[in-house]
Amino acid sequence: MLRRILFPMDMSPFSKEALLWLSKRALQRQSDLLVVHVVSPAAGLNTPHLVQETEVALNEFCQKNLPEELFYKVIVATGDPLEIIPEYASKEKCTFAVIPIQEAEEIAPLVKQLAIPQLILRSRNGHFPEGDIYNNITVAVDLSPERTDMMLSELRDILQQVDTVPSITLVHGIPLEDAEDSQTLLNAAEGALEIVAQEVSTWNPNTSIHIVSGQPEIELTQWIEETAPSLLVVGLSTHREMWQLILGTTAEALIEGTTCPVLVFPTA
């Protein structure tokens, strides 16, 4: 899965630091990098010159700062990033994406356009995560059998590749609108989540569960911020006829409203 990694680059100091962070980990995993920068056509007649100038600058930065042993490819194109980045991800057969995102920057539109596993990389207090981001994982589970199985299978594959046995918490949110049915819903959800946890425990012994009640898009986000996992994992459905992801209300709240790195898996 980590064989060929797409990295959208905007030439800001933030994205340069993110690329350096990724390059060290990509080298450890023997991954290739595809670094893509998109120039706005708003430059008009000066656009071709700007593309060429940016390509030279980006190549120079990579040659100077990336490990010599790391294989990478630089692409500078012009157009709409929401069209160009997915186009090259597909054309170059990328198997994974790492998307650096600054605070208050909207990420959902690009996430929806990339139907490949992707890591949304954030910094805290100006610093990217040190060490292993896979050591304390929270997995947001909606208990849809097919989506849950697919997401956890993908997570297992990545953990095997990075050779890590983390602490995993499976969390599920229940909207409780009817007080009479609340305990029944909680018991049913807890039972279903326990079954999932038993399966995960066969390949990751340190696995626990947690139920959050209330409005999931609010309560789940708040709970994740309070527990501060090293990584949040979510699964998003894919459109059958388009290379895109379906972003529901809760998933969008988790992706936009949390500050930890988020690992997104496309699911059926």
Image: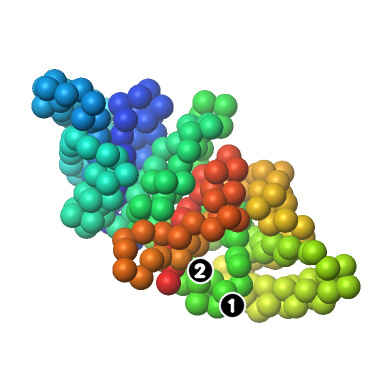
Q: Nearer the viewer, residue 148 or 206?
A: 148
**Residue 72 lies in what quarter of the image?**
top left
Where is mark 2, residue-wise? Answer: 152
Query: What residue is drawn where x is 36% and y is 52%?
Result: 113
Q: Nearer the viewer, residue 159 or 17?
A: 17
Where is mark 1, residue-wise? Answer: 199
Please identify the quadrant where the C terminus is shown.
Answer: bottom left
Up-down relation of residue 121 to residue 140 (above or below): above
Closer to the eye: label 1 or 2: 2
Please identify the quadrant where the N terminus is shown.
Answer: bottom left
Up-down relation of residue 66 to residue 177 (above or below): above
Marks counted in the figure total: 2
Q: CA distance from mark 1 to mark 2?
A: 10 Å
Left or right: 69 with respect to 181? left
Amino acid, disc 1: Glu
Query: What residue is drawn where x is 75% and y is 78%?
Result: 188
> How far across and down, in percent of the image, does residue 163 sit?
44, 59
**Residue 179 lies in what quarter of the image?**
bottom right
Left or right: 40 with respect to 151? left
> How far across and down, in percent of the image, does residue 239 sit?
38, 66
